[in-house]
Amino acid sequence: MTEPAIRVAVLFGGKSGEHDVSLASSRSVMAVLRDKGYMVVPVGVSRSGRWLTQGDPHALLSNPARAIRTRF
């Protein structure tokens, strides 16, 4: 029987001036984790502090037009 993949949450974004750097570095980290067989759960934090767990948090935080529509 195969063991289930270990689930790992990766938090990125946030109110800091390093918000964009966090988005970029988390993409790399998540890619490596997936390649190693982990189940990645992305958790984005908007510039206003809202936590995003549904859909694609990277897409929401990377696209300013989308961010306005979702009312961060």
Image (tube, rainbow, N blue to C red):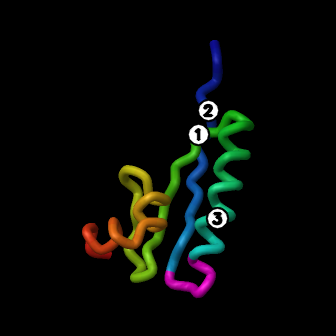
Picture disc at residue 24: 3
Residue corresponding to mark 2 = 5
Q: How many marks?
A: 3
Tell me which amino acid carries mark 2: Ala
Q: Outermost residue, front direction?
A: 65
Is tag 1's residue or tag 3's residue first in the polypeptide sequence? Answer: 3
Label 3 to label 2, Cα distance in Å? 24 Å
Q: Which residues are magenta?
A: 15-19
| Residue occupying image coordinates x 64% and y 50% | 30
Contact check, label 2 and label 1, Cβ < 8 Å: yes
Classed neighbour count for the residue bearing mark 3: other residues with Cα under 10 Å, few (<14), some (14–19), many (≥20): some
Residue 43, position as x, y percentages in the image: 49, 60
| Residue occupying image coordinates x 56% and y 64% | 11
**Vertical position of residue 22 compared to residue 55: above or below:** below
Going by the image, does 56 lie left or right of 18?
left
| Residue occupying image coordinates x 66% and y 40% | 34
Q: Indicate the quadrant containing the C terminus: top left, top right, bottom left or bottom right.
A: bottom left
